[in-house]
Structures are given as structure tokens and as C-alpha cells.
Image (spheres, rainbow, N blue to C red):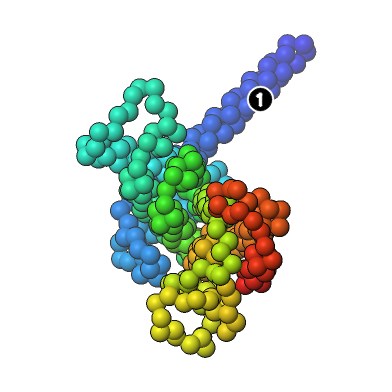
Amino acid sequence: MPSLFLKLFYNVTIRQHFCRGIASKLISNRNQVMGQMQHVLSSMVMEAKLELSEDISAMLASAMNQEFKQSITPIVLGVVKADNITPSIQSLREVMFSKIKSTVKEVFENCVHVIRSQTNLVISQHTTFEELIKQFSHQQFLFIITSICDAQYILLLRMILIYMLAKEMQASNVLIQEMEKCKDSVFEFVGIQCSQYITPRESEMLKLSKEEVMECIQQLYSYLQKCEKLSGKKLDILRGTINSQGQIFLEGFHKTQVNKLVLLLRQETWNWEGTPVPQEFQETVKQITQQTTLKEPTEETLKYLNVQDELFASSSSLLILMQILLQYIELLGQYSSFINGLDLSGRIVQLLTVYNNEIKELVLGAKAINGPSGLKTITAKHLSFVNCIIRCED
């Protein structure tokens, strides 16, 4: 009896061990198959020859792309049936990230090679990435960042095509949702990669002219708009980086204009008879006030400044102030997409406040006497003249 019991116990134990072995092997084999499916899917997506275009409809209708869709459909359906959608799309996303990083790095290195072959750019073994980025001239940096953006955009077109083809298959709602998440993360990752080349240049922005800064920011913003149109969503990271460049420029621009105005005020002669007004300054006032009915003067130089058909005696600092104000207004009109209008308006108020405070100190506070302006005394005529200037400014 005991021997029979032992035999039965032994047989059951052997069978349980055998079954557990089969189960573990099946799980292992399934995981291998899933991994192979993920690898095949990612490889086909990244290596396939596709016709890429900004015209999404034409891209989808392309015979080459439709042929690719037919070849990849069995793999996609297999992923769906095996309930392996999320891991497969996550694997695709990581492959896309890796491809974007390697492409950007390759493009950057090629650009540096071209620049070094044309210039005397010196790069030591100890030069950091941030130091290298700062070494490039404005035009060299534009060459680099434009090349990077172009290369990234080609990869984004591939991502959009794969996403649209997945939607056409209608294989699974989960597949479409996961592909949309993948698309959004890839677009944001492109923004991060691009920002890594822009941010180290922030200190260099202050050394550029207004025209150079605007050229750089406009090119970046144009790329941003293309990407956002392609994605259908805002790219917050890249947009924030570009806006940051605009704010850095505005900070430097504002500081320069304030210092320029203060220096002019302290050298102002305060001639109560007024400063002759060249025609170009009258045109500046006309643009600021948007006057359309102002009579065209015949003289090249005017005695008074015409502001909305009211005549004011002028000073040299007031004329320069008008020119500066026009530059602020032009910034607000031309570059409002990447320069904060509220911030810019606040800085205009700051500029006018500085102007008024300086006038009070120099004339009402009598600090202009015996100063750089050469003023010996302040009379009622000077006070009346300053009052006229302040009224004109208002």
C-alpha cells in the first residue's frame, strides 16, 4: 500500500514539474516571438523606402507608400491579435528617439567639418559642447540649425505617414491611440533636441544686431510652425525655447535704448527756443500716431513738431525718443508671434517713465546746471519748454 501511494505521488509530482516546464517554455517562446515582432515592426518602419511630402493626401496616395502598407499590415495585425500593441509601439518610439538623436549628431558633425574646412575654427579636446556652440558666428549657427531642422523634418514626415497608415488600417482603436501618443512624443522629442542647440547661444544673442536676432528667430519660428501644422498640436518645449530667445533679445534691446536715452538727456542743452525738426523725425511721429490727414510739409527742416495737428517745440532727446518708440512699435507689429506684447508694452511705459524722471531731476531738480549740457541757469522759459516736451510725449 505504501509503495502504491509513493508511485502515485511520484507520478503526480513528475507531471506537475513537466507541466510547469512546458508553461515556462511557452511563456519564454511567446516573449521571444513578441520581441521579434517588435523588432520587425520597428525595422520596417525605419528602413522602408517611402515617398515623403508635406502634402499628406499625396503622401498617402503614393503607390510606394501603399505597397509598404500592404507589406506591414500582417505584422500589425499580428501585434494586435497577440495583444502586444503597447510594448510594440513603445519599442517603435524608442527606435525613433534613437534615430533622431543619431541623425542630429551626424548632421551637426558634418556641419562642423564643413565650417572647419572653410575657416580657422579651432576645437580642442577639452572644448565642451556649450563652448563650441558659442564659437560659431551668426551665419555659421544658422547653417547648423537649419541643417538640423531639415533633417528632423524628414523624420517627422515619416512619423506622420506611419501614423496615418495605421489609422487607415482600422485594426484597433488601441493601436490608433498608442500611435498618436507615439507621434506626439516624437514631435516633442524633436523640440527637445533642437532646443539643446539653441539654448547655449542665449548669451550670444546680446552681441547680435536686431536684424541678425530677428533673422535667427524667424527661421526657428518658421520651422516651429511647419512642425505644429504637421502635428496638429503645439510643441510647447520648442515654442518656449524660441520665445525665450525673443525675451532675451528684448531685455538687451530695452537696456540699450534706456541707456542711450539717459545719456542723451544728460547732454541735452535745453534750448528753450526748440530744436529744428528734420523731415525724417516728423515722418516718425506720423507713423507712431498713425496720422493720415497731416499736410505734407514743403520744408526739409521744420521749426515745430506736428503731433496730430498740434505744434510742439522739440528737443534733440525728444526726437530720439520718438525714433526709439517707433522701433518698439515695429517690434510689436512684426514679431508679436515670439515677443510678448504685454511685456513689450510694459517696457514702453518704463522707457517713458525713465524719460520723465530724468527730465524732472535735470531741470526741476536743477542737476543739468554745470553738467555736460553746459546749462548755467534754469529760467521760467526752460520750465515752460520742458512742460511742452512732456505734453508732446503724452
Q: What residue type is labelled 1?
A: Gln
Locate residue 77, reporting x and y percent.
48, 54
Q: Residue at (39%, 26%) from the top-left corner? A: 127
Image label count:
1
Q: Which residue lies furthest to the right in this view?
A: 1
Q: In which quarter of the image is the C terminus?
A: bottom right
- Disc 1: which residue: 16
Nearer-the-camera pick, 324 or 24: 324
Residue 336: quadrant of the picture = bottom right
Q: Residue at (60%, 82%) from the top-left corner? A: 310
Q: Where 112 falls versus 262 (above or below)?
A: above
Q: Where 318 falls versus 253 (above or below)?
A: below
Q: Residue at (44%, 84%) from the top-left corner? A: 297
Q: Residue at (72%, 18%) from the top-left corner? A: 9
Secondary structure at numbered mark 1: helix
Locate residue 12, reporting x and y percent.
69, 23
